[in-house]
Image: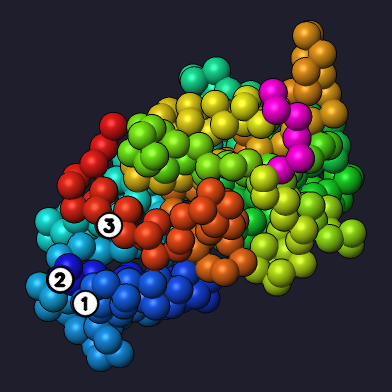
Amino acid sequence: MIRVGVLRGGPSEEHEVSLKTGESALSAFAEKHSVNDIVLGKNGGWYLNGHPAYPERIFQSVDVVFNALHGTFGEDGKVQQILETYKIPYTGSGILSSAIGMNKVLSREAFAAAGLLTPRAAASAADESPAEFARRVLRTTAPPWVVKPASSGSSVGVSIVQDFHGLIGAIEAALTYGPRVIAEEFIEGREATCGIVENFRGSGRYALPVVEIIPPENSDFFDYGAKYGGMTNELCPAKFDGSVKARIEDMAREAHRAVGCRHYSRADFIVSKRRAAGGEPKIYILEINTLPGMTKESLLPKAIDAVGVSYPDFLNHLINLALRGNKL
């Protein structure tokens, strides 16, 4: 019997979401494996099955770690470095690809190098005030703008603003989540997401069904509250044309490869009202999630269910990849 450690919690703003992802995983793994609940507290303390413990003790108790952390420390390569120091197999992407995927500046560069279309954007410099950055954004990109922290997930700290005054306020708000901010042009269109699973159903990079995300009427986009408050309408499979779905799947595979993701990922897109030269809608990639949420409200489990795979079977696939050291 495999001793599985489910690592959840963490110091980020996504602590509660991570606890929910981990709770779902604990229940699923309990059917077949010996399960250990590893909680990383907001203050940095480690706990094993509810009791304080040093990492050395924790990692002697497990054969593999299912990484259910989200956000800072969990998705940016830091906890991955700790796990590799203790030579513990773990699910999800490695140190470098986690750092790239979490950093929206670096991931945009990886997408562009792979030929993927991204919204026009500007990133703040370390020595720029919010007003200085806002003036630079105004000179290069027309409103409305999407303002977001350069390193965060679950749409934490993201705003859509229409004017210069709102832009400064959104930059200031985003800076509370990290030292750098990105301001992107707002792309009007339909939101979509697509998950990739490695070595699944005979494919090295298997694309799960595309999901269309329809935010509630009072929300401009798929924000944190919409994601975890059950307020969105999520269509899986999505009702895009077959050619559009195929392009999204190909872009998700390419994004997974470009960032160097491992085991699984989920990329987010906008299918724009803008048209390319051939008449097809332009599809923009927004970001990639190297540790997609796995709560009951999360998108990846819905796509897995749509292809007839149970949640426990999918999690077992991931820990088997980790134990085999799988990397394409």
Q: Looking at the figure, which quarter contains the N terminus?
A: bottom left
The span from disc 2 to disc 3 (Cα, nearest Å) is 13 Å
Chain-order first, disc 2 or disc 1:
2
Q: Amino acid at mark 2?
A: Met
Q: Position of residue 176 (x, y in %)?
A: 60, 62
The span from disc 2 to disc 1 (Cα, nearest Å) is 6 Å
Residue situated furthest front in the rendering: 308
In front of the other: 316 or 133: 316
Asked if residue 210 lies left or right of residue 33, the reply is right
* Residue pointed to by mark 2: 1
SS type, badge 1: strand
Q: Is residue 224 visible?
A: no
Secondary structure mostly seen in magenta is loop
Q: Nearer the viewer, mark 2 or mark 3?
A: 2
Residue range in magenta is 238-243
In front of the other: 90 or 41: 90
Q: Which residue appears at 53% of the width and 68% of the height? A: 295
Tell whether label 1 touches label 2 (CB within 8 Å).
yes
Q: Amino acid at mark 3?
A: Ile
Q: Position of residue 197 (x, y in %)?
A: 42, 43
* Residue pointed to by mark 1: 34
Q: Looking at the figure, which quarter contains the C terminus?
A: top left
Chain-order first, disc 1 or disc 3:
1
SS type, badge 2: loop
In front of the other: 18 or 306: 306
Mark 1, residues whose alpha carbon is within 10 Å: few (<14), some, or many (≥20)? some
Mark 3, residues whose alpha carbon is within 10 Å: few (<14), some, or many (≥20)? many
User: Which quadrant of the view contains residue 327?
Assistant: top left
Mark 2, residues whose alpha carbon is within 10 Å: few (<14), some, or many (≥20)? few
* Residue pointed to by mark 3: 319
Q: Is residue 63 visible?
A: yes
